[in-house]
Image: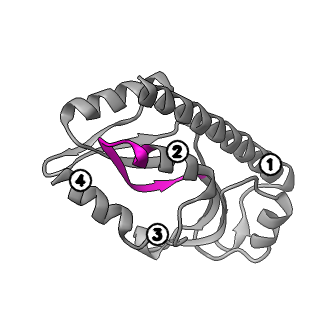
């Protein structure tokens, strides 16, 4: 059953907004999927976004005004905020996230141990029914409101600071991904 599910999941079309796996997480994604007792169901390498929060408060109604999975350019952020919408706009740095299906609870426990040695203290088992799914997530993140009511809430100096801080956190996120890759690779060799 597990092997059939793994084959089906890995052969299906990518339904993410981007339509493909992020380059920054691809090596880790491929490594996990090469292991006989695990496969990935979804992932994101981490990103920096300007997000228009809808008045409805519903996630499906939110709009990305800017998104990058690499270093954010201050000029790009500033340009996106030249005519801000009435709704609240947040500058967010989101950590990487990977959903991993494990063959057994013992395999899930083994993966969780590796995740924790890589410093991923917020990782855990999401479901343990028909499929055992582990969520591995980075710890670097930030959420800062930058505009509301069609006007900036922050001055240029502060906007530069939060853009720089988001870039710093995204860089640390990438370093954590590389560490996780080496820990999982070591697990594979055991």
Give the residue displayed 65% in from the left and 76% down from the top. Answer: 85
Judge the density around disc 2: few (<14), some (14-19), many (≥20) Cα neighbours within 10 Å: many
Residue at the spot of label 2: 28
Q: In the rendered view, tell whether residue 37 sits above or below residue 10.
A: above
For the residues marked 4 and 3, what is the alpha-carbon distance in whole angstroms? 23 Å
- Of the two numbered discs 4 and 3 in the rendering, the one whose residue sits closer to the viewer: 4
Badge 3, how many Cα within 10 Å: few under 14, some, many 20+?
A: few
List the residue tagged with mark 4. Answer: 3
> In the depicted view, which residue is nearer to us: 92 or 173?
173
Q: Helix, strand or loop at disc 4?
A: helix
Q: CA distance from mark 2 to mark 3?
A: 18 Å
Residue 179 lies left or right of residue 189; in this view the side is: right
Instruction: Mark 4 or mark 3: name the one nearer the start of the chain.
Output: 4
Snapshot quadrant of residue 59: bottom left
Residue 158's disc number: 1
Q: Of tags 1 and 2, which is closer to the observer?
A: 2
| Quadrant location of the N terminus in the rendered image | bottom left
**Helix, strand or loop for disc 3:** loop
Nearer to the camera, 97 or 59: 97
User: Does the rendering let one see residue 59?
Assistant: yes
Q: Which mark is residue 16?
A: 3
Relative to 17, residue 99 above or below: above
How far apart are labels 1 and 4 at the CA level?
51 Å
Q: Name the N-terminal-most of marks 1 and 2.
A: 2
Q: Is residue 112 magenta?
A: no
């Amino acid at each position: 059953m597990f092997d059939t599910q793994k084959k089906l999941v890995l052969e299906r079309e990518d339904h993410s907004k981007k339509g493909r796996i992020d380059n920054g997480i691809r090596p880790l994604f491929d490594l996990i999927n090469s292991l006989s007792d695990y496969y990935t169901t979804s992932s994101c390498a981490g990103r920096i976004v300007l997000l228009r929060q809808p008045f409805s408060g519903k996630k499906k109604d939110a709009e990305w005004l800017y998104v990058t999975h690499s270093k954010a350019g201050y000029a790009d952020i500033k340009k996106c905020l030249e005519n801000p919408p009435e709704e609240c706009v947040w500058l967010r740095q989101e950590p990487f996230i990977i959903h991993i299906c494990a063959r057994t609870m013992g395999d899930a426990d083994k993966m969780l141990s590796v995740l924790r040695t890589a410093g991923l203290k917020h990782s855990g088992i999401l479901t343990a029914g028909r499929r055992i799914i582990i969520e591995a997530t980075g710890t670097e993140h930030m959420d800062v409101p930058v505009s509301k009511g069609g006007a900036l809430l922050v001055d240029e100096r502060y906007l530069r600071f939060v853009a720089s801080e988001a870039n710093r956190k995204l860089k640390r996120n990438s370093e954590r991904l590389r560490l996780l890759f080496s820990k999982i690779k070591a697990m594979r060799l055991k």
